[in-house]
Image (tube, rainbow, N blue to C red):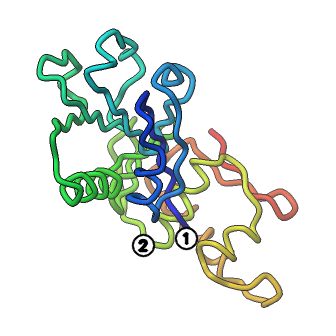
């Protein structure tokens, strides 16, 4: 399953980014779309160039954003991830991959970081397996999905094969969520999975 990556830029570099970052599911938007489209459960790449000197909509930027800019006097929040250009293509790709791999995903009182599941209210934490992390991250990103989608795209199981693999993973994830006393719940309704708080 490809990780989602939002790209915000006013440059006409969509084709370049699509080929450079082909392992991601890209959504490319103009800079002025930031205010409505920053998602803390997605990696957000913001590219600001000399032509965007008037862009000032930084209020929504958070630690799910990587800002790439050639502007030397860019006044941004110190907590933001900022990458100054020029960069080689390999440097750019490696930095984006590192950023995406280390992205913290938040949902209500839950935070996912690497393979660590953290309750932000009480600082309780536990560790997830890579598959558990993928399932929970996808659920947080989409809020609702079908069991078949997770079976096919995360577990790589054909839908016509009878298995309890997904139910086993969900059971372990729920136990870990209970252990850290989060308010977040994974619910099953028919063949749908929902995450709520």
Image quadrant for the N terminus? bottom right
Does 145 appear above or below 154?
above
Per the image, label 2 sits on a secondary structure element best described as loop
Does residue 187 appear in this view?
yes
63 with respect to 183 (left or right): left
12 with respect to 81 (left or right): right
Query: Disc 2 designates what residue?
Result: 129
Foreground residue, 1 or 48?
48
Report crowding for label 1: few under 14, some 14 to 19, many 20 or more residues within 10 A (C-alpha).
some
Query: Residue at the spot x=51%, y=35% of the render?
Result: 39
Query: Residue at the spot x=23%, y=20% of the render?
Result: 77
> Residue 113, percent across and down?
34, 53
- Front position among marks 2 and 1: 2
Report crowding for label 2: few under 14, some 14 to 19, many 20 or more residues within 10 A (C-alpha).
few
> Considering only order in the chain, which callout, 1 or 2, is on the residue closer to the N terminus?
2
Per the image, label 1 sits on a secondary structure element best described as helix
Hey, which quadrant is residue 81 in on the image?
top left
Image quadrant for the C terminus? top right
Query: Residue at the spot x=19%, y=15% of the render?
Result: 75
> Residue 180, percent across and down?
43, 52
> Residue 91, percent across and down?
18, 55
Q: How far is the residue under mark 2 from the one under mark 1?
A: 10 Å
Foreground residue, 154 or 7?
7
Kindly identify which numbered label has been placed on residue 126. Answer: none
Does 155 appear above or below 58?
below
Query: Residue at the spot x=26%, y=56% of the render?
Result: 98
Count of numbered badges drawn on the protein = 2
Kindly identify which numbered label has been placed on residue 172. Answer: 1
Does residue 178 appear in this view?
no
């Amino acid at each position: 399953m490809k990780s989602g990556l939002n790209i915000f830029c006013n440059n006409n570099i969509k084709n370049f980014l699509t080929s450079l970052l082909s392992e991601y599911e890209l959504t490319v938007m103009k800079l002025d779309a930031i205010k409505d489209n920053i998602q803390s459960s997605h990696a957000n790449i913001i590219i600001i160039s000399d032509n965007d000197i008037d862009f000032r909509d930084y209020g929504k930027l958070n630690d799910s954003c990587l800002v790439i800019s050639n502007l030397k006097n860019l006044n941004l929040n110190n907590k933001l991830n900022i990458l100054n250009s020029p960069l080689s293509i390999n440097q750019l790709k490696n930095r984006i991959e590192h950023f995406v791999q280390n992205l913290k995903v938040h949902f209500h009182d839950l935070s996912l970081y690497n393979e660590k599941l953290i309750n932000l209210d009480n600082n309780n934490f536990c560790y997830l397996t890579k598959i558990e992390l993928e399932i929970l991250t996808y659920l947080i990103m989409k809020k609702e999905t079908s069991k078949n989608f997770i079976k096919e795209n995360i577990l790589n199981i054909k839908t016509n094969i009878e298995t309890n693999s997904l139910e086993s993973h969900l059971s372990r994830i729920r136990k870990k969520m209970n252990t850290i006393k989060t308010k977040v719940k994974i619910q099953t309704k028919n063949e749908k999975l929902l995450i709520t708080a």
